[in-house]
Image: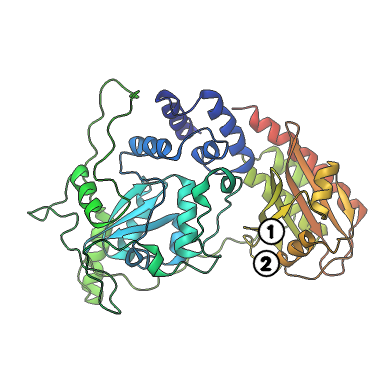
Amino acid sequence: MEVVHRIGEALVARGACAQEAVRQALENQIIFGGRLGTNLLEIGAIAEDALAETLGERYGVPHLSGELELDPAAVALVRRELADRFDVVPYVLSARRVGVLCIDPTDLTVMDELAFVTGRDVHPIVVPEARLWVLLKRAYGIERELRALSVMFASLRDPRSPDPGNPLPESLLRTPIPGEKAAPAGSAAVDRSELLVGGEGDLLSEEAWMADMAASAPGIPAALPGPPSAPLVTVPAPPPPPFELPAYTRDLLARMAVETGRPPGGAAPAASTPRPAPAEEGPLTLEAALGAIEGATDRDAIARVLLRHARRAFRRALMLVVQGPLARGWVVSAHGVPADAAVGLELPLDAPGLVAAAVAEGEPLAAPLLHAESDVRLVDRLGGGAPSEAVAVPIATHGRIVNVVYADGGPGGVTSPDAVDELAALATFASRRYEALLGRI
């Protein structure tokens, strides 16, 4: 939490938000996940541009916020799975360099691999996490849990945003630059070899870099923002050094030039060796699950324990996050169903359905599913096939329900009273663990 607190302190010091708002956002972060800035945006405690400016100062790199247009040629350099894994979106491209939007510009391993994959020098540009979520969906059809942000952060609900897996057409990804010649049919990009390079071929300073980017790509300011009205320190920090390609990448590309005949800086192979998937964890007894929750340090660990225990007696289980009028899908545990299959699932709590009924009653509910839209949508996410009976167990903390565990025995399956009682007991223990974690803030 040290870095999180530093960002929170920086925001308070410059008057961007109140100390109490940071505390509330930290509490929400424990329950709902996401970064501190995302939770501040969600409760309406900070403006996106103020958050982006603070992040840029803390990391010492350029920052952007608001509506951004992406260069389709830059987007095409990074495959969907890499963008998803690294939380990055390529933004603008030149012959030798690529500007990449990210949330953690200090992760040199990611920057290193992007340099290898794109065959270009990588310039990180920090953006708020919520903004990156929007751009991941627009460019690659990658879903993130937008949560209540879709209500208060108006620009997240972009009317041009495609459905998952249906990226925006290239013609809408980037506003043409007046006077710019169109790329020849089939070409990857307009060649801007002069971009980011000084007269002697050296890297430009940060200010000149931003000015040149502004001249060639919409959305980038012509100059870095001036100092905040309430500076964080009395002595200005020295400007960050020019970006330099990591030595590891230079050596790796040099070796590739020898081994494959490809010149240094050339594009990397179209595919890289996939990382092995983590081994699936086995089911937990009630006793083991209670012990595991006792040692859980975040909400993800709590969710994993609940789903691993549910696997003992149920064929399918799903964790949902309750926010305002919706229960939003979080993670699934079901044979043959991806763990992220629930992302994007939204069940209205003011409409008929098993989950809505459990939230309304505030206690575990085991019953047949209704022929209601919410229940149909829920079962579809679990692979289809309605059970004869299912269970929904709410988890509450600080007087509000924050999660619901749904479980069933698969198509036509029924629930065991003992299994329901164990899941309910574990949910009660999870509520206490949430409260313990919140008490540490």
x, y (%) of residue 10?
Answer: 41, 28
- Residue 48 picture quarter: top left
* Residue 3 shown left or right of residue 341 in the figure: left
Furthest residue to the bottom?
Answer: 185
Q: CA distance from mark 2 to mark 1?
A: 7 Å
Query: Of residues 22 and 374, which is closer to you in this image?
Result: 374
Amino acid on which the number 2 mark rests in the picture: Val
The type of residue carrying mark 1 is Val
Q: Earlier in the sequence, mark 2 or mark 1?
A: 1
Considering every residue shown, the one lying at the far right of the view is 417
Looking at this rendering, what residue extends furthest in the front direction? 178
Picture quarter with the C terminus: top right
| Vertical relation: 101 (above or below) 180 | above
Q: Residue at x 22, y 36 (%)?
A: 239
Task: Give the image location of residue 266, x and y in percent.
Answer: 24, 69
Mark 2 lies on residue: 337
Q: Which residue is mark 1?
A: 332
